[in-house]
Each structure stands twice: as C-alpha cells, then as structure tokens.
Image (cartoon, rainbow, N blue to C red):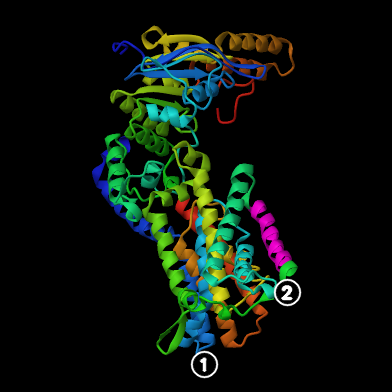
Amino acid sequence: MATETAPPPAVARDERVRRVRLVSRLLSRPELGAVVGLVVVWTFFAVVAFDNNFVSWSATAAILNRSAPLGILAVAVALLMIAGEFDLSIGSILGFSGMAIMLLVTPEAAGGFGWSLWPAILVALSLAVLTGLVNGWLVITTRLPSFIITLGTLFIFRGLTVAITRLRTNRTQLGNLDEVPGFDLTRKLFAAKLTLFGTNFNVSILWWVGLTLLATWVLLRTRQGNWIFGTGGAVDAARNVGVPVRAVKMALFLTTATAGFLVAAIQAVEFTGADTLRGQGQEFQAIIAAVVGGCLLTGGYGSAVGASVGALIFGLVQQGIVITGIQGDWYQVFIGGVLVVAVILNNFVRLKAAARR
Amino acid sequence: MSSNGSPLLEVKGISKFFGSVIALKDVSMFVRAGEVTCLLGDNGAGKSTLIKTLSGVYRADEGEYLFEGEPMDFRSPRDALERGIATVYQDLAMIPLLSIWRNFFLGSEPTRGWGPFRRYDVEYATATTRGELSKMGIDIRDPDQPVGTLSGGERQSVAIARAVHFGAKVLILDEPTASLGVKQAGVVLRYIVQAKQRGIGVIFISHNPHHAYPVGDHFVILRRGQVYGDFTRNKLALEGLVQMMAGGEELENLAHELERAAAGGAAAEDLRKAAALLEAETGTREDREPPPGPAPRPGG
C-alpha cells in the first residue's frame, strides 16, 4: 500500500522493469522457439547442402509441398491441444476418409460403389465428421483422457478401413481416380500446380497458409478463441464463468477430423488413389509439430502459426536429408532430437512467462 | 451500517444432507446491500457446503432461499450469476497462462461486427479491464501480461473487480485471504471495502478473525453444521471473535489437561510451555486455523 508513494525511485525502477519485460515479452510468444528452430535448421542445411542447390526455388518448393499436408493437420491438432485434448486418431481418419472416397468411386465390378466424384467426396466428408463426433462424444461423456480414447479410435478407424476395403475389393490400395467423372474440378481445387519462379508449388500450400491464418484469427480475435484458451487453461474456472467447454471440445474434434479429411482428399487427388495405411504416424508428427510450435501438452497455451512452423521444420528436415544425400535412416533421430529440444525450450519459456516477477 | 432495512440475500433454516451426514442443520443468515457479512468457522464446520448452496452448486434439502425478497431455486451457478450472485473461489478464479484482459472477459467477451466478421473487441476489452481495475485502485502495468505473473492478492483482486464489473449484487468470497501474506491480504481486504462502498452485499468466508473483523459488519459463526451465533460488530470485540472461532472452551480444557499432565510427566517443561503457548494463542495469535494439538507449528 505504501510502496507506491515514492515517485523518484519508482520511475527509475519502472524503466528497468520495462527493459526486462521487452525480452520476456518476446520470450512469451509461443512460436518463438519454433521460429528460432526453423532458422537454425535451415541455416544448417544451407551450409551443409549448399553445393547440392539447397538454397533454390525448386528446393524451397519441394520443402513447402512436403510440409503442407502435415501443416494442415498440425494447425487443427494445435487448436485441440490448446483446448487441452489430443486427437491421436487423426492419421486413421485421414486413411479412412481417403479410402472412403476411393471405395465410393471404384466401379462396382471391382467391389466399389461406382459413384461419381463429388457425391463421394461429400459422403466421405460426412463420414469424417462422424468420426470426429464419435471422438468428441466419447471424450465428453466418459470424461476419460482423450489420449486414451483417441488411441482406441486410432486402431478402430484404421482397422475399419483395412477390413472394409479388403472385404469389398480384396485389396489394400485403390487407384485410377483420374478416370472418374468430376476429377478435373477436384484436381483444380486440391492438387493444382502453381508455377512460380520456374518451379511447381502445390495448391495445398494455399490451403495450409489459409487455414493457419484462419486459425490464428479465431484464436486471437474471436470469443471462441478465448474459450479455447480458457477450456485448456483451467476447465473448471472456464465452466464457472460460463464458457461452453463441451461445445468447444466437440467443435475442435470435428475440426481435426475435417482436417484429416481435407488432407485425405488432397492426397487422393494428387496420387489418384488411396492406400489403407495412408496417414499412419501422421498423428504423432502433427502433435510434434504443434509442440515444437509452442503448444503445451497440458493445454491452455500455443499458437497456430507455431504449429505451422513446426510442420515446416519437418518438411525442411525431410527434404534437407534427401538433398544432402544423408542416409534417410537418420531422419527419425533428427526429428526426435528437435522434439526433445523444443519441449525443453518450451518448458523454460513457460516457466519464465508464468514466473512471478 | 445496518440502516438500509431488508436483506439482499437471506437463507432461512436451510439444511443439507449427504446420505446420513448432516452437513448443514437449520442455518439462517443474510447480507444487506453495502454490508459485509463474515462467515467464520473451523474446518468441517460446513462453510463450503453453505457457500455452494448460496452460489447455486447445491440445492438445500430444507429451508428457504430469498434474494431481493423473492424465493429462489437455483439449478446451477450460472442461474445464480444471472441474478447477480457472483462467487469468487479461492483457486478457481483465474486461468494463469491467459492474459489479464482475456481472463477478465472470459465467457462474456464483447464483440464487434456481424456474421462471419463478428470478432472479439480487443480494444474495448483491454481499455475496460484497465479502467475497471483502476477504479478498484489496482494499477496493472500491462493488461497483456499473463495472470500467472500476478501475485495471489492481485489475482483475487482482479477476480473481484471482474465480478463487480459484470453487475454482481452479492459477492461471495471463498477464503480470499487464506493463502496470502499479511500485506497481500491487506490489498484484498481493501477491495472488499471498495466493493461494499459501491453498494454490493459481500459474504466473506474466512478462517481468520483478524482479517474478518476489520471489514465485517456482522459475523456468522458456523460450528458443526449449525449457526453458533450471529453477532453485529458493535456487540463483539476481536478477542471474543477469536475465542469463539477457535472453539474457546474446548481449547481451555485442553490447556488444563496439558498442565495436569505436565505436573506429573517427565517432559514436564516442554508440555508446560506448550500449554502456555496454547493459552496465549486463544487470545492473540494470528493464524488461519486453530492449532490441531499441543505441538507448536513450524514457524509459529
């Protein structure tokens, strides 16, 4: 009470506090760690693989093309993680949706349904939404950790994909999507190539950037974004002040499922087919990208831009290893290392941000 | 102080049972606008049950709940909040990683624009947060800083300011000073007085008579699920309050018992000291709960 009554020393102290705060303010941005990591990893490959033409438009396009699908998943997963939940089944939903499209359009003679492409895409989207509903409903009604629930649905959705596909077609891969009516329009939407600087960029990069911007806007500039942070930060406190925490969680499980569908559609059109095992392991890569991008595993903190940068680091490492000619086996070591360093850094940053002055 | 007649919030003869356990029995209490009713009691006295009944979490099994003279039957805390009964819980008030202004408006965010362009009015939210806090005499450096960087007292103060801003007529404060140091507790007590001066009825739950006495207009003492007494401030001295809080005569009996034991026992000196300490404590010691036994607590 009496400490605020001495003006001269207070001013001097205030100035010192401000200087320190500028640093801690920068540190408190969730995506800072990822941006630093991105610069470090890029510089590393730029030096090591300079002679292999790493610093070029074609290499950059290859990196972005690789990063885009994971980036789309990572942004959705990041939103859900900020709300304090996981979706480990997103990779299975990806495989499930891709196979749903292919099964519906495959001719009846080959065990499919012989639909045209657009109805198939809409039904596959509905099925993906249904998987999201199942995840959300199970998590909300049982109140069990979503880690366990979606670990279960990871196997259920994948198992269904494999079993149904084999039952109907006796195969695990379906192709020839380009022979189905309506393919040209979907190609423009999901798999167009944009030629810039004499090299090809996939249109999925636009989807990725657009969704990152949308997610960032929702998080930082809408009430729903505030609810996402509140739900993950302290669910009881949020509920006490009237945040509809169940609706928030449900909406985000639907978001991750829809993201899984979108990537499935992009890849099915791009590769003109689907594989029952597509998307396997993507759930972990998406979580790693989100964590590298500053999301806390405990929820309540993180950013969509950070998750996108995390996905970009993945693409950078994958492509960098290819270009450099390092044995591909080292990729996992590299990614694991990046994850551990990112978590240590994030933990440090969070302690700094939450520490009492 | 008790000039403005009828109570704002009143419960009459309420009871709450959990199976065979009688948590509250025939409890009556009230708060008037612009007054502070202190609710005091030891652990297990039924304070939490009473707060939860007042704030709409539980429904009483017997008795009447009157708000502004009308009988109420709240089904959820949200119902109570809509009528203007706001509860600030000790630990559940704030989300540490979220900035002050985001916390302040969480669940009641102001928006601008329409349709898909409806967005969180950030400028209004930050300006209002700063304004409301300064009205309560809280000077925050930066509304953008996470609540986790605030001290416990500041956090409670922000929660109180928030409840006041959103039109609380009755403010229920669950042990707002319990985990705070002397200075911090002082800050919170000052905001309680501020809220009272703005015409809000405050129900202040506390373990600590030293915190309750300076701000309270009257004191309801709860013991073993029943109201032990309801005293206005001018009829009660601080010492009397401390005595009743600590369960006065029980402690005296314990002190005598210890003295007798000390007279014959081997560790006579130690026990005599403990007894003396205990006697002193019933009068003056500042603590938030009565001592559980003869052993002096560390640092006490």
User: How far from the left and from the top, in percent, is residue B264?
Assistant: 73, 10
Please indicate whether residue B285 sits to the left or right of residue A217 in the image.
right
The residue that disc 2 covers is: A171
Does A2 sit above or below residue A209? above
Q: Quadrant of residue B135?
A: top left
Residue found at the very far left of the displayed protein: A8
| Chain containing mark 1 | A
The residue that disc 1 covers is: A51
The mark nearer the N terminus, 1 or 2, is 1
Main SS, magenta residues? helix
Residue at point 33% right, 53% down?
B115
Amino acid found under the numbered disc labelled 2: Arg
Q: What element carries label 2?
A: loop
Q: Is residue B200 visible?
A: yes
User: How far from the left and from the top, in percent, is residue B32?
Assistant: 35, 16
Determine the CA span between mark 1 and mark 2.
44 Å
Of B51 and A228, the residue lying toward us: A228
Magenta residues?
A147-165
Q: Residue A282: which disc?
A: none
Amino acid found under the numbered disc labelled 1: Asp
Graded by Cα atoms within 10 Å as few (under 14), some (14 to 19) or many (20 or more), the crowding at tag 2 reads some
Of A63 and B184, the residue lying toward us: A63
User: How far from the left and from the top, in percent, is residue B102?
Assistant: 38, 47
| Chain containing mark 2 | A
Disc number lying in front (1 or 2): 2
Of A316 and A211, the residue lying toward us: A211
Graded by Cα atoms within 10 Å as few (under 14), some (14 to 19) or many (20 or more), the crowding at tag 1 reads few
User: How far from the left and from the top, in percent, is residue A154?
Assistant: 67, 59
Q: Can residue A292 be seen in this view?
A: no
Please indicate whether residue A133 sits to the left or right of residue B79 in the image.
right
